[in-house]
Image (spheres, helix red, strand yellow):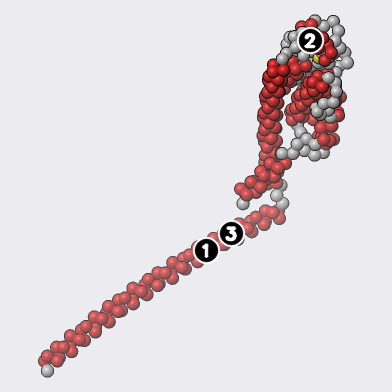
Amino acid sequence: MLFKMESFETKAQKRERNANFTKEETDLLISLVEAKKRIIENKTSNAITWQNKEKAWKEIEKKFNSSSGSVFRDHKHLKQKYEALKRDTRRKSAVVQAELYKTGGGPSDASVLTPVEQKVKEIILNPDNKNESCYDSDSVRSNTPSSDIVQPTVAFEQILREESISSIDNTEQCSEPVRKVFIVSQDEEKLKYESKEKRPFEKLTDEKIQIANIKKNLLKEELEQKIIQRKILEKELEHKDHIYKLEKDINSKEKKPFDKLTEEKIEIASLQKKILTEELEQKLIQRKMLEKEFEHKDYIYKQEKDHILLKIKLLKKELGENL
């Protein structure tokens, strides 16, 4: 019975663990992160900065759980969710930028950023009004060497590379001078590379390679997200299992006298049932022994009867011969 109850509890927990962040939870998380963006998006890497970030995430955890009132989320899960939102925003922004380049600023099939993604983008690009983010690719083009001006497709790959690096640790300071990437307009691109225009076959091949690279990066991101989700589910399972054990211990320690009396009565009834079962088994064995004994006596009686009849026949035969 205990095994069934535990298995039922496990299934219920599994259903509950599969619950994703709701829109309200996501909006609440972004608003709390926005209030702490100077600390969370600080690019300095030292012990004090790490302590401040850890403290900020724990404060966000308290405010989030006190305001949401639904599923408990610890600061690690909240941070992982925020990192996933940042990755999605970077990837979507890169796709939008690439589509704008293809269409020359005209209508495109790329989906626009949602209000949440727009907020995340603002947090990434402007963590501090005084400092400029090392992930900003929309800076004004001024006094920039020509080597830093690249095509949008190259910028797209650069953004994806930065995204994969930041997914490991977005708070780590850039280890080398920031190389800003600028998007050249379509008119400037035509003027610069008019004489070096590629043939249609080469353009098609390049586009196919770019699409394949984009798909590859998207698959990598999906795999990373699934790994993170799996870790979150494992942590939630450990947390719920710990809570279940604590509740079980508390319930066992806080039993009322009525519950104890009921348990004792159940134990006495179980013992009486066992005694009656044993007595019944003994009576059945005695009955079988009596049946065997009766069969044995009946067999002996038949043997003696046959023996007496045989003697009578022999006596009659002897008397007949004498006469």
Is 93 displayed left or right of 262 in the figure? right
The vertical placement of 222 against 194, above or below, is below
Q: Position of residue 8 (x, y in %)?
A: 66, 47
Residue 204 visible (yes or no): yes
Tell me which corner region of the image, top left, top right, bottom left or bottom right, holds residue 33: top right
Q: Quadrant of the C terminus?
A: bottom left
Q: Which mark is residue 300?
A: none
The vertical placement of 61 against 201, above or below, is below
In whole angstroms, how far apart are the C-alphas of marks 3 and 1?
11 Å
Task: Specify the amino acid type for callout 3.
Answer: Ser
Residue occupying image coordinates x 79% and y 6% = 146
In whole angstroms, how far apart are the C-alphas of marks 2 and 3?
96 Å
Tell me which corner region of the image, top left, top right, bottom left or bottom right, holds residue 63: top right
Q: Nearer the viewer, mark 2 or mark 3?
A: 2
Q: Answer yes or no: do the residues labelled 2 and 3 have beta carbons within 8 Å?
A: no
Task: Specify the amino acid type for callout 1.
Answer: Thr
Is 213 displayed left or right of 62 in the figure? left
Task: Specify the amino acid type for callout 2.
Answer: Glu
Tell me which corner region of the image, top left, top right, bottom left or bottom right, holds residue 223: top right
Q: Nearer the viewer, mark 1 or mark 2?
A: 2
Element type at marker 2? loop
Residue occupying image coordinates x 71% and y 39% = 18
Is 100 displayed left or right of 157 in the figure? right
Which residue is more in the foreground, 222 or 315? Answer: 222
Query: Label 2: which residue?
Result: 194
In whole angstroms, how far apart are the C-alphas of marks 1 and 2?
101 Å
Residue occupying image coordinates x 86% and y 29% = 115
Residue occupying image coordinates x 46% and y 68% = 284
